[in-house]
Amino acid sequence: MAFKKKMEEKILDVDASMQGSLIFKDAVNLRINGKFEGNLETKGNLTVGPTAVVFADIIGDNVIIGGRVKGRITAKERLTILPSAIVEGDIYPAKLNVAEGAILEGRCWMLHDFLNAEELARYLEVDLGSIMEWANSGRVPGNKEGNDWKFERKAIDSWVASGKIDK
């Protein structure tokens, strides 16, 4: 007889004032209702509640903004900006949903499954010269097509998560 072990859902609901860097290596459902300042990296779902004020660079899978966020947002799967949201800063979503009434001030670059060298430099926040050096030396996963490099975003995410990136 086989038993299936139910995965316990990890939920973290923060209603406090926090500062610093939060990095979650395992998938969580994180909800911020208070104030946060710093850097935030999550796997799973991140919700910024309607009363939250966040000054941070955010990297996450599914990011839902209902409050005020100032900073760079990278959503590897989906970014949802609710009607109550005020977002100031550059966003990098794979998919984007902006509700009527939401305020978005900044630039948007849609993430694609494949990135060229310039897009990868923006994605990783490094200079183009470093990307070209890494690509030509085989340190970053990519494919050369003619004179141009193509990088699969999922392979890049795995490469970064493995700690092999050398900024």
Image (spheres, grey):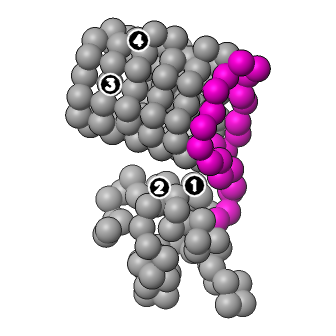
Image point 28% across, 12% down: which residue?
Answer: 16
Q: Residues within 10 Å of mark 2 (few under 14, many from 20)?
A: few
Overall secondary structure of the magenta section? loop
Image quarter (top left, top right, bottom left or bottom right) of the C terminus = bottom left
Asked if residue 12 lies left or right of residue 43, the reply is: left
Amino acid marked by disc 1: Lys
Dots 4 and 1: beta carbons under 8 Å?
no
Nearer to me, 77 or 138: 77
Q: What residue does disc 4 label? A: 33
- Amino acid type for the residue under numbered disc 3: Phe
Against 60, residue 117 (above or below) is: below
Instruction: Specify which label sits upstream in the sequence, 3 or 2.
Output: 3
Give the CA separation, mark 1 to mark 2: 6 Å
Q: Is residue 6 visible?
A: no
Query: What residue would you read off at disc 3?
Result: 36
Between 79 and 99, the one nearer to me in the picture: 99
In the image, which is nearer the foreground, mark 2 or mark 4?
A: 4
Q: Which residues are magenta?
A: 93-115
Amino acid residing under circle 2: Ser
Q: Distance of mark 3 from mark 2, alpha carbons?
A: 27 Å
Mark with earlier residue (4, 1): 4
Badge 3: residue crowd in 10 Å (few <14, some 14–19, many ≥20): many
Residue 7 location (% of width, % of height): 46, 18
Q: Are marks 1 and 2 in contact (CB under 8 Å)?
A: yes
User: Mark 1 sits on what residue?
Assistant: 154
Establish if 93 lies above or below 115. Answer: above
Between tags 4 and 1, which lies in front?
A: 4
Which residue shows up at 32% across the image and 59% down it?
163
